[in-house]
Image (spheres, grey):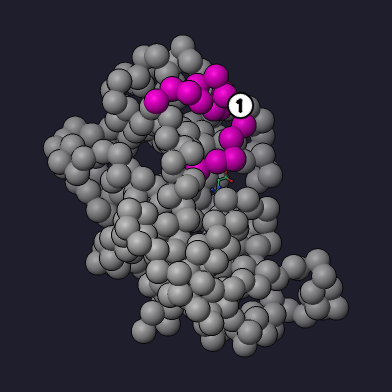
Amino acid sequence: MKHILDVSSLPIKTVEMILQTARQFKHFHIPGDLLKGKIVTTMFFEPSTRTHKSFQCATYRLGGNTLDYNHYTSSAKKGETLRDTITTMSQYSDVIVLRHPLEGTVHKCAEVADVPIINAGNGSGEHSTQALLDVFTIQSLIPLEMTRSPPFHIAFVGDLKHGRTVHSTLQLLDKMYTGIFFHFVSNEGLHIDKKYTENLRNNHYCEHNLKNIINMMDIIYMTRIQKERNTNADRSENILTKEILSLAKENAIVLHPLPRNEELPVEIDNDPRCKFVEQMKNGVYVRMAILDYVLSK
Ligand code: NCD
């Protein structure tokens, strides 16, 4: 079964195929019937706007239908286990898109599901479909030769301990490119876990202050502090103000998986280097390509 659970189990060939299909969907014809008769079930046990809605939008654009599982009105309230719920929803769906706060749950559900499971975020673990859309966005904005001719610098900024998009995007970039310099910029106590960095092929550095390094960066990837995950920090120490962004390269790009908090003030929204709206829009094309891949024979 073609589950999409984490970056480490995604072969490069599959990634390239999905990105190529997404490019076709973005720039050429969108076949409105690829998912005709298919049902995509969304099961979100954590809040979501972009991931949830872009998966639904992607399904409709390809002519499919969605079922939305609601935990609070389901038989879970009568004591049904998640295992039984997944078995049940597998009977009614062709694929399940699942977000869950506990890191191991999505993988456990994939073991019992009769249909492919797509990980839409497992706690502080991974967010592989966001990684695909981040790499898609980077490839569409930065010429390939540039990422291949070192040094190429990327700063991941914010809550790197809990930020699952960073964990996945970092691994996917590391898998696809060499010659990158990763810079991890975080508050004390929110550093990236060693398990995500110890096997990196590319160079990586830990930093505290974005201002000191921003002039070297090709990509500035901002993230919010994940207050819901028991952090004791409630504000980012690195806020991308107009003044700090003015120090960045003219052709740098600013990405953010969103939602944003104080780290990305609206005062910079009109700066042409800010590409997070394009990034979120790309989520639809990439998720269309993911659904097409998972549901094709
Ligand atoms: C992120 C997530 O849920 O991990 N958002 C998203 O899916 N685009 C980032 C976040 O919640 O901070």
Residue closer to the observer: 247 or 107? 247
Residue 274 appears left or right of 142:
right
Q: Residue at x 66, y 34 (%)?
A: 232
Which element type, helix, strand or loop, lies under badge 1?
Answer: loop
* Residue in view at x 44 percent, y 15 percent: 244
Q: Is residue 168 visible?
A: no
Any part of residue 264 in sight = yes
Q: Which residue is mark 1?
A: 262
Please identify the quadrant where the C terminus is shown: bottom left
* Quarter containing the N terminus: bottom left
User: Residue 265: x percent and y percent?
Assistant: 57, 23
Q: Nearer the viewer, residue 32 or 250?
A: 32
Q: Which residues are magenta?
A: 257-272
Q: Position of residue 63 (x, y in %)?
A: 51, 72
Residue type of the residue flagged with mark 1 = Glu
Count up the numbered dots: 1
- Measured as percent of width and height from the top left, residue 32 is found at 45, 69
Magenta-span inclusion, residue 67: no
Q: Position of residue 80 (x, y in %)?
A: 77, 80
